[in-house]
Each structure stands twice: as structure tokens, then as C-alpha cells.
Image (cartoon, coloured by chain):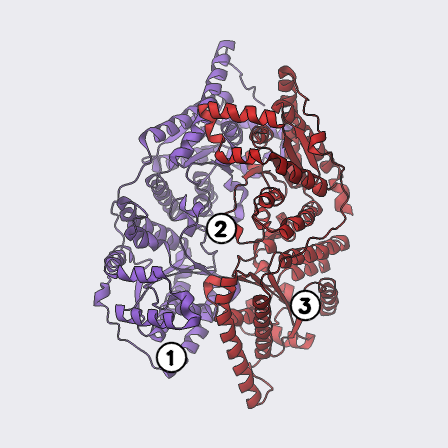
Chain colours: A red, B purple
Amino acid sequence: MLKEFEGITPEEKETLKREIKEAREKLMGQQQMLRDAKLPVIVLIEGWAAAGKGSLIKELISEIDPRFYSVVSPAILPETEERYPFLYPFFSAIPENGKITFLDSGWMESAVRKYLRHEITKKEYQRRIRQVNEFERQLRDGGYLVLKIFLHIEKKEQFERLRSLAEEPETEWRVTEEDLWQHREYKRFREEYEEFMEATGELLPWHVLDGSHRKAAVRDAMALLTGEIQKGLDEGRYVGEPFDEEFPMKEMPTLAEVDLSPAIDDEEYKKELKKLQKRLSELHNIIYRKKIPVILCYEGWDAAGKGGNIRRVAYPLDPRGFDVHPIASPLPHELNRQYLWRFWTRLPRTGHICIFDRTWYGRVMVERLEGFCSEQDWKRAYNEINEFERQLTDWGAVVIKFWIHIDQETQLARFTERQNTPEKQWKITDEDWRNREKWPQYEVAVDEMLQKTSTKNAPWYIIESNDKKYARIRTLKIIIKALEEACEKHFEEKME
Amino acid sequence: MLKEFEGITPEEKETLKREIKEAREKLMGQQQMLRDAKLPVIVLIEGWAAAGKGSLIKELISEIDPRFYSVVSPAILPETEERYPFLYPFFSAIPENGKITFLDSGWMESAVRKYLRHEITKKEYQRRIRQVNEFERQLRDGGYLVLKIFLHIEKKEQFERLRSLAEEPETEWRVTEEDLWQHREYKRFREEYEEFMEATGELLPWHVLDGSHRKAAVRDAMALLTGEIQKGLDEGRYVGEPFDEEFPMKEMPTLAEVDLSPAIDDEEYKKELKKLQKRLSELHNIIYRKKIPVILCYEGWDAAGKGGNIRRVAYPLDPRGFDVHPIASPLPHELNRQYLWRFWTRLPRTGHICIFDRTWYGRVMVERLEGFCSEQDWKRAYNEINEFERQLTDWGAVVIKFWIHIDQETQLARFTERQNTPEKQWKITDEDWRNREKWPQYEVAVDEMLQKTSTKNAPWYIIESNDKKYARIRTLKIIIKALEEACEKHFEEKME
């Protein structure tokens, strides 16, 4: 192993030691300020095998209270990625406000390695670069400090380090086939790392550190980290500005334009329901085998009939292959993270169906109207949500969004019935009545949401639900059509 | 496929349909009462392959609001179990108060199958049976309703069902090699199922349902479920009585008997620390390769020096192979489950080290003294915790528990110093001062805890921490010794 202070004079060694000690003390003091300022920090350490990423992280965390950081090593969870979207392990790992997450390699290594292994196509690789840029911007705009470090060593240095690890019986196991492969392919990796950093360095810069001298690398990384934190503390939490990106859109009517009269008679309903549920059950088998993930989103007026609608959709599904996620107010640990985190961590595995009973659109409805987030936050959310959903459909997911729609009179009738029926009273709360008073404001917000987020890849459907039975038949038909299309084009997309 | 109403008269068919409908309506009404009574329910459906477990669950959930139940299929997470203790997926799946978890096969299938596959020894199989009994009792004593159903079909019936699935192209994939193997080994499975049910049926009975007639099975399961819920609602939440079980114990002094004078001089400390950290780092490599899980528990007086102690232990560890879990007050979704749930879900994977900064012993300290649980609850906890820790060490984990000990004068000095040092003020709160006033009550609780839970397999160590440096050296030495022993006997244990 390399000596820690090799090739420098005793005076330089003393200086280095002092600088590290000072930076460490600074970091120790910053912990508390980070916590008070509720700033979350992500430190991504990428770099070559044997460059010393692990030991660097060890030094960085050595004086931090364990309550305030976590270390994540996506490399130890190889199977996760296979069944979830590319960004899933990284989004899942973002810290709470006031805490730090250190990543021992992350989205860069994951993308580059898969590409060089030909496990993903060039097209998919480029998509991932775009997704990384979206991800990093969303984090920054959400107030996260993101520090990206690449720990560099030359090929000769890597050779020496791998050899010295491999020759010791105690450390031999640490040199993996993957490491040896990277070493043989050093040149290709280097080109790709450089290209990746260029493609993702505009918004948040990469810091390439010389890893050949371990202690100097520690000093440099410490200086970067404490500097970044100080800047964050001085400037205060960043709130990103809204901006528009073009997405291919489906044309949507306003709520007022929707004719709510459609209805279905009982006999027809029963017949159709049975037929459609049978077909959905068959399709569930197929998407399970083809490993297509399906995400069904329900939003709508209180008492519009979401619950009953969801039950009719869920009934024919194999319970082993689907989940329903009822979304209530965020818990403290959810509130303390970027608002999409609690949805990322609830995504289905490939081949599974998940139904969200209320969704991330709370951001542009209740959070907007109740002032739970700033105006910039909810205005920015349209774009962020479109990006999020594009990441899901790029992954291969079917994403369908329903607005279960009724008029005010129907709502009143249903509220009153709930109030007067003992078994249904739990379904109606004071909050429902309060929300009802805000119908006009909600209508504005919903119309804006439908206009701005009904992308072709993840469209909204307004479901006429004055007649609940009609609504159920309609959602079933929409789901079935979308699944049939997805099953058909699944092979084509794989071949792209 | 079998006809749904085969072999019965039209009148019987009508009766059956009516009974199911009535039970379903009853269940629908019970949902709300369950929620109000905050009763959690676990429905375990075991049974033969192709007996209809999935469809039965589908029927049971069809009228339940998705917010109030979840369906768990441990079979879809085969890799989980390999790296976690046997009960991990099942404990992780327990519902919150007022909700229902349905398990599509569970601890019985998992244990029996692995035993018949010779993947676990007879000894381990018997241990698992004991663990199941402990698990079910802990759930019952913690207020859970647990309903255990075995869905039975004869060998001939299973043959017909598997054949009809295998002959349809749409369903062929559902018949797995595992199913065919079970069918060939029907007799052995039957014997083992019977034995397992006998060994685990004393406290909470098994209900064997005839699965040959699907609709009758639905009716019977519905009747059982609604009956069990009604009983739970009528009798109110069950609180288990404390009871004693014999565990081999390590002898412990009382806190008052501990001599707190040991100290270490600075030079000696630095030398020892470096040497011990190097050794711990080597051992971390070995336990990682041998896949030995390690659980280090820290409890102690406020300002005793837990944080600094933990940092010295963590420093030499590879950050990819360990986690620190700071334990604060439980979040709402944690508070709404059996108190050990939030620790079960934080267990390390095999080969990993995890450090708990405060632990499940909060139950018999702060929760006892602040009245956050009933007297029965904390008195029962000694035994439950001993069982929990035995389950961990049976799994192969090293479990070490430290009480970081100081005297009252030292605490006062440290509190005062924190109060007077701006960078340390965040470490001291009003609560710390309030707790300090309760020192005598805490001392009684801690002494009782140390006497009742210092088992030979998961012993307590009282660490003299008036001199923090001495304390750090001592914990390091204890950890190193335990890891060395574990590495040595690891092979022997595997051969048992």
C-alpha cells in the first residue's frame, strides 16, 4: 500500500496534517449550523477502482455525529436496479433536511459501466445522462447542496494499487473481476468518464481530485465540502425558479366543459364489469411475464368515488402483483425530503401494478392552495413532475392518471348521505366540508394541472363519475387499452 | 379449472352466495370499528400450491378500503431471507394499528420448504418452530389479532388443478418447478405441515379449511375472519401478562458497585487506539467475507460519551459495510406497531455491522418511567427482548450491549461545559436536565434491566466512562474479542 505521506518533505507533511485537522474541526462546527439551517447535503464520490473512495469517505465522516450522516454504496445493491428505474436507488438515498448523504460511487458509475458493458444501448445511455441532469437540478432547486467529486488516479497507479491489494491474502478478495476489467479497459473508461462529466457538469460542476496522494486528496475534499457548506449557510436555502420545458401534450378540456351526464344501466354495468375484469386479469398475467411496470394515479373531488373505482380495478388483479398506496399528509421524515421522495420509494417493481390513491399532484393542488410550499415551488413542480413521469415511461412503465370528476351538487348529495349513514360517517370529516368551500380555487388549480401535465406519455383522463358505475367501466376500458398497447409495443421498444 | 359452484344444488348455491354476501358486508362495517379500536390484524393464509390462496385473498379484500390492508407475498422476495434472520420478512410486514395484513403463505411455508429441501438442518428447523411460537405470542401479547388458515386440498385435486393450469398457454407459467416438486413429495409435505401445525397450534390455533370447493372456502374464511374481528372488538385490545423464561445469564454487578476510577494516560491511549482500530479493520474484512452479522448496542447516561465512543469504533470500519442507527422517539407509523418493529426493520445484512445509538431497551427505561407503556408491557419486555436477541444470535449474529456509565458529578460537569461552550450547546436540552433529576428512578430501571437481560448469548458490558478515553479502549477490546471468537467458531456452528 502507498505510504500516507510519501514523497513530501517533513514540513509539507506537517502543513498537510494541520490543514486536515483544521478542516475537520470546521466540519464539526458546521454540523450544527446545517441542522439549524435545515440544509440537506449530498456528497457524491465517483472515481476509479482503488482510487480510495472508501477511505476518503471514512476520513470525511470521522468527526461527524452519526445522527447526521449516512453512507450509501449502491454497488452493494446490484439487484435493486434491475427491477426499478435507473435513478431509484439514488433518489431513495437523498438525506433529510440538516443531514448529509455520502455516496460511494453513484449515478455516474452506474450509467457508464452499464454502457461499456453493453447492458444498455447508446440511446438509453443518453437518456440516463438527461435524467441525471434533471435529477441534479431538481435537488438543487429543492434546496439540496450537491457536491460531486471524481477521484482520479493514472493507469499505472491503479495497477500498483490493485497489485498490492491482490498480493495480500487479507485484501485479495477486494479486487473484483469488475476492477480488473476496468483496469484493462482503462482508456475506454477514461473517455467515457470525461464525456459523462462534460455532459453533466454545466449546472453542478464536477471536482476532479488527484487521488494519488491520499492525504492530499482528503485535504482537498475536506476543503471543498466545508467551502460548499459555508456557501450554502451564507446564501441560505436555494429555491429554484420555475421554467418551461416542451413536452408533447395531449389536448385537455377544462373541467367546466366536461359533460357529466353519461350513465350506464345496471344490467349493462354488470355484464361489462365482468367482461372487463376478466380481460384485466389476463393482461395482468401478461405484463407480469413481460415485466412491464404499471402506475395508475387517482385524483379527484372528495366523494367522487375513487375508493370504489380502485376496488373494481384491483379486484381481478393477483394480490401478489399489485399494491395500493393511499397517500395521506406526509410524515415528518417525508416532509423533510424533496417532495417526490415518498413517491419514488413507493414505485412498483417491473411487472407489478401500483395504484396511487392520491399522488404527487398534491403539490399543485392542496400544497398550492394551503400555502404548504412557496409559489416558486408549485410552479416549478409542473415541469419536475413531467420529468419524473418521463423517467418512468422511459423505464418502460405505463403511467395513467385519472381525475375522477363530479359536479358540486353530486358532491353535496354524497356528503349528506355519508353524514346520515352511521357506517359511512367515518368517510366524511370537517376537512371535507372545508375543502368543498374552496371548490372554485381548486377548480382553477386542477384545470391548470390538467393543461400543464397531460403529456402524451403520461396522459390525464377526466372520468365522468356522477354515475359511479359508468366511471368504473370507463377507467377499466382505458387501463385495458393502455396495457394492450404496451404489450404490443414492448418488443419494438426493446429493439430500439 | 374447477367450476365455482360445482357439485351442489341450486338451493345450496343460493345459500352460499347469500352467506358470502352477508359476511362481506359485515367485514365492510368492521373496517371502521377496527380503525376506531386501533386493532391490528394479521391473516396468514398457508396451504398447498394451487389450493387457491391467492384467489381467496382476492375475495377477502374485495370490499376493504385499500387504505386499511396490504397483501404480502414473501415468496416474491426470495433473496431477502438469505441475508436476514428467518422472521425478518414477517416481522417487517406486520400492520399498523387499525389495519390488516394478509400473507399469501408465510412462516410455515418458508420453514417447511427449506427443511424439506435440506437447506436448513433439523436443529435449525426446530429453532424456527420455537421462534414462530415466540413471534406469535409477542404479537398476541402486543394486541394483534392473528388468524392462521391452512387451505387444504387432496393430492388428486392438486394434480387436476396443476394440470389444468399447465395445459392453458395463458396460465402455464404459473406452475413452477417448486409446485411440481411439492406435488411429487405430497406425502412428505403433508407430514411436515401437520407436524408444524401441531408444534405451533397451542397458543393460536390453526384453521384447516377445505379448499376443494372455492366458494365454500371463501365463506368459511370470511366467517372466521369476521368472527375473530368481532371477538377482538368485543373483548378489547389484549395486553399480555409478563412471564419468566429461563435464559443462561451472565452475572452483573449493580451500577453502584462499579468502580468508575479507571483511566488511561494520553500517550498510552493514542498507541492503543491505533493498534485496536487497525485490528478491528482487519476483523471487519473477515466478518464481511464470513458473512457474520454484528449488532452493537449503546445505552448510557446522557453525556456519558456514547457519540465519541461510537465514532472511534466506526472510524476504522469500511463505510460500505456498516450503519449507525440513531434511535430517537418513534415516528407515528412506528408507534403504531409492536415496539420491536422499528428495530427489526433496521437489522444489518449478513456480513455487515450495525451500531444502535440507543436501542429497544428504551422500552424498559424511558417508556417505563414516563408511562409510555403499561406496567405489563414493560415487565413483559425483558422476556420478549431476550427472545428477540436469541433469535439474532441463533441467526449467527454477534450481539454486544454497552451501558456507558458515569457518575452524577461527571454528568453535571459535562452538562455545564456543554452549556457554556457555544459549539456544544445543541447537545444539551431541557430534557437532559429533566432526565437528570430522575437519576435515582433510572438507576433502579437500569439495574433491573442489566440483571434481567444480560444473557450469555447477548451480554451487557458496563463501560466505565468517567474517563472517556479509557471507555473507548475498553469497548474496542470487547468488540475485538467477541469478533475473534465469532470468526473462530463460525465453521463449527455451521457444522452443527
Quadrant position of residue B366: bottom left
**Subunit under mark 3:** A
How many residues crowd mark 2 within 10 Å: few (<14), some (14–19), many (20+)? few
**Subunit under mark 2:** A
The amino acid sitting under disc 2 is: Pro
**Subunit under mark 1:** B
Nearer to us in this view, A61 or A261: A261
The amino acid sitting under disc 3 is: Trp
Measured in 3D between alpha carbons, the distance from the residue under mark 1 to the one under mark 3, in whole angstroms, is: 40 Å
Does A113 appear above or below B156? below
Q: Quadrant of the N terminus of chain A?
A: bottom right
- Mark 3 residue element: strand
- Residue bearing mark 1: B269
Identify the residue at the far left of this view: B257
Circle count: 3
Q: Which mark is residue A206?
A: 3
- Mark 2 residue element: helix
Q: Position of residue B308 (x, y in %)?
A: 41, 70
- Residue bearing mark 2: A332
Q: Position of residue B211 (x, y in %)?
A: 48, 25
- Mark 1 residue element: helix
Task: Please name the residue shown 68% across and 60% down the image.
Answer: A113
The amino acid sitting under disc 1 is: Tyr
Q: Which mark is residue B62?
A: none
Residues marked 1 and 2, same chain: no
Specify whether A24 is left or right of A44: left
